[in-house]
Image (tube, grey):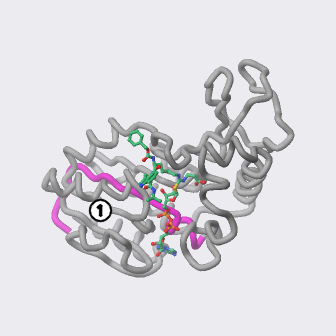
Amino acid sequence: MAEFESIVILTGAGISAESGIDTFRDAGGLWERHRIEDVATPEGFARDPDLVLGFYDSRREALAKVEPNPAHRALARLEREFPGDLLLVTQNVDDLHKRAGSSEVLHMHGELLSALCTSCEMRTPFDATMSNRPPCPVCQAPTLRPDVVWFGEMPYQMDRIYAALGKCDLFVSIGTSGAVYPAAGFVQEARLAGAATLELNLEPSEGSHFFAESRHGPAGQLVPEWVEEVLAG
Ligand code: BV8
């Protein structure tokens, strides 16, 4: 690996698979048991809030039973030891990057451990259940929803992400199927900026052909190896 000065990393559900968190599109994944339209859209939430709040309550509770894996820990090591600029963007709503030691994590699709109040629009840390309609810690209204970006909603901090993509010299995509936009388009932004592009995924994703290099295998093995390479510069 040549010396890099500015790296943007995008992670998806595949980086948390070896920690025991279901991905969306693999066999037995989340979307096999729930229709996206029913649990991950504003319309689904309006139609059946109890179904949606229960879906996220169960995923939030599952977090307490899983641990970060070597891939999360390798990215935390990269943050500590890489001398250049590093932006870690995740599509995941789990907290495993943070628990592995990454201090700067951009959750573009929100977080299970955050609540958004539909009355006062404040976002607050949250690690309980929403099905029993707890009061918003700020305005007391019983109108909390998961602070998660649903389909048709605008992901968080897109300006910051595009600015970083425009000036990076390496973009790495880890554990994502490349099925959902705008995240799936980041590789093209990076290429336009002249960056090198690398995909680390269990198998070729829908966007593999956009990457200059693709490595296939479990993130728990590929990511520590790649971090070692980058730090050896
Ligand atoms: C937006 C949070 C509008 C929730 C998620 C038509 C109609 C309406 C909308 C659209 C449309 N066409 C396109 C769109 C836009 C839409 C979209 O892309 N739809 C798709 C389905 C076509 N996107 C949106 O709506 C986004 N918003 O567009 O805003 C807008 C835009 C501009 C201006 C104004 C408004 C919002 C999308 C966000 C949805 N929220 N998550 C939650 O978590 O519950 S999506 C969810 O799925 C993830 O966050 C992620 O983004 C996405 C993909 O999941 P992955 O992480 O990739 O996981 P997946 O299971 O798919 O793949 C796992 C991969 O890991 C696999 O490749 C597998 O091989 C690999 N793997 C498995 N094990 C391992 C491994 N790799 C390594 N090691 C292993 N061990």
Q: Residue at x 31, y 52 (%)?
A: 8
Q: Is residue 161 magenta?
A: no
Q: Residue at x 32, y 68 (%)?
A: 207
Decide: is 101 above or below 228: above
Categorize mark 1 by other alpha carbons within 10 Å: few (<14), some (14-19), many (20+): some
Q: Residue furthest right?
A: 132
Q: Residue at x 44, y 66 (%)?
A: 176
- Percent from the top left, x then y, of residue 99? 59, 52
Q: Which residue is mark 1?
A: 231
Q: Residue 144: x and y, percent?
A: 72, 33
Whether residue 16 is in magenta: the answer is yes
Number of marks in picture:
1
Q: Nearer the viewer, residue 85 or 9?
A: 9
Q: Position of residue 200 (x, y in %)?
A: 37, 71
Locate the N terminus and report the quarter of the image it occupies.
Answer: bottom left
In the image, taking residue 88 as reference, residue 129 lies left or right, namely: right
Asked whether, in this view, residue 36 is left or right of residue 189, the answer is right
Q: Classify mark 1: helix, strand or loop.
A: helix
Image quarter of the C terminus: bottom left
Is 213 left or right of 32, judged from the image as shown?
Answer: left
Percent of width and height locating residue 177: 43, 68
- Indicate the amino acid at tag 1: Leu
Residue appearing at x 53%, y 55% in the figure: 92
Q: Is residue 78 above or below residue 141?
A: below
User: Magenta residues?
Assistant: 1-18
